[in-house]
Image (tube, rainbow, N blue to C red):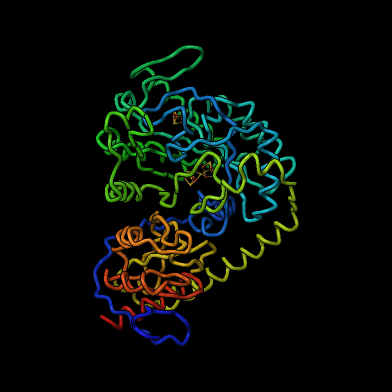
Amino acid sequence: MSPTTGTTITPESKTKAKKSSKGCGCSSTTPQQIDPKIQERIEKHPCYSEEAHHHYARMHVAVAPACNIQCNYCNRKYDCANESRPGVVSELLTPEEAAHKALVIAGKIPQMTVLGIAGPGDPLANPKQTFRTFELVADKAPDIKLCLSTNGLMLPDHVDKIKELNVDHVTITINMVDPKVGSKIYPWVRYQRKRWKGEEAAQLLHERQMEGLQALQEADILCKVNSVMIPGINDEHLVEVDEAIRSKGAFLHNIMPLISAPEHGTYFGLTGQRGPTPKELKALQDSCSGNMKMMRHCRQCRADAVGLLGEDRSQEFTKEKFLEMTPEYNLEKRQEVHAGIKQIKDAMKAAKAERAAKKKPRGEKILVAVATKGGGIVNQHFGHAKEFQIFEVDGVEVKFVGHRKVDHYCQGGYGEEATLDNIIGAISDCKAVLASKIGDCPQGMLKEAGVEPVQGYETIDKIALKYYEQFKQQK
Ligand code: CLF
Ligand code: SF4
């Protein structure tokens, strides 16, 4: 292959990488041993298991319009910002419509394993709609895991019902354990027909959240905690939050960046409160990651999200469209697909174990960007990628460390120069970009920017490790 066309990783490839070596600055998260029984409960949940998120999809149904608190990063015109990207509006569904949608999608996307309710308000401020939806789905599609995300205010009142409905995954958004900090995030809370304000409101919310978390642990329901990182308000304080939730038995902590644009009309957006930089976010996640499992693959999705975490197929299933579709839920067919995914995952795991058994010394860590449609495979055209997954490679291990969203390069068949500049900027700390195909023009520009274009269609691990060998030889 000519050097101008980049590197293609094939078994017979002889192409050499041309990059200089520089540390990637990525710190590893502490490896955590997970109890096999818990592993079984999370292995098909794309949010609770990083590994699962490459293979399994989730869907949300927007059945919960009301909310009982006010967060300063939320504008009620939009979906709950505790688990959604601010500025997004979902179509509200009745429980019956939501169940119909779930059955349609379970047939069309058999790798969809989780149904979550995360808005557009707070699911537990709308218990009837939330629980009715879960009942309907559990009755018709028993293999779908049920998941719920709440601000926690009403959680202690509903843990028994949650357990009864076999909802095994609950997220609480906890941004503070100190009411002084809380009063800067929550102007009011509505509880028992009374509106609470200031520190009193934050104290009440905090107590209810902790009570709910404890009750979940006692009921053996897996709990993830989401925290919104707000620089200057709770950034340093989140270390304390991390300790508090760990001591109460939370399974996973997901620290998300505040997104506050003035056009979203939120209090923080209008008062100029900034969100954290990626570096600040990573530093905080790293400082908490010694304590417990830290989620780093959250995509801050929508209250009506559908698909793998990195993709958004919600527009294929708008209310107008899905109501016209006939549900084709078929448990046997789904189980076959899941068995196929398990085989692939097992083969990947075995290859990993084999590499580890060789006890090869680990080399310098580098980052590579990957265009993928999921499945742990390099299977996407560079120009079609809306995000790149970032992996840290050291010659032995290929570890997912994050993702970078980009505007995709091919718009209507033509590459856009400005977009390409942005893409290259987003992955410029990577030594290489791996994609199934990369056009001549982007290849040239990537090389100029010091990012080796690598083409191939294989597992991410294989292509990344092969590239690593070439990278070493070129040093
Ligand atoms: Fe939805 Fe949340 Fe359940 Fe996942 S999302 S209710 S736990 S099924 Fe996942 Fe989306 Fe991040 Fe939420 S990527 S915003 S963490
Ligand atoms: Fe908005 Fe969600 Fe906060 Fe309610 S809990 S105010 S819907 S972000």
Residue 206 quadrant: top left
Q: Is residue 417 above or below residue 123?
A: below
Q: Is residue 348 above or below residue 422?
A: below
226 or 264: nearer the viewer:
264
Q: Is residue 176 left or right of residue 383?
A: left
**Count of numbered marks:** 0
Residue depicted at 47% across the width and 35% down the height: 172
Residue 231 quadrant: top left
The x and y percentages for residue 3 are 34, 83
341 or 419: nearer the viewer:
419
Quarter of the N terminus within the rendering? bottom left
Going by the picture, which residue comes out furthest to the top? 194
Q: Is residue 426 left or right of residue 398?
A: left
* Residue 243 in view (yes/no): no
The x and y percentages for residue 53 are 52, 55
Quarter of the C terminus within the rendering? bottom left
Residue 451 quadrant: bottom left
Residue depicted at 50% across the width and 30% down the height: 212
The x and y percentages for residue 261 are 34, 37
14 or 398: nearer the viewer:
14
Residue depicted at 50% across the width and 58% down the height: 51
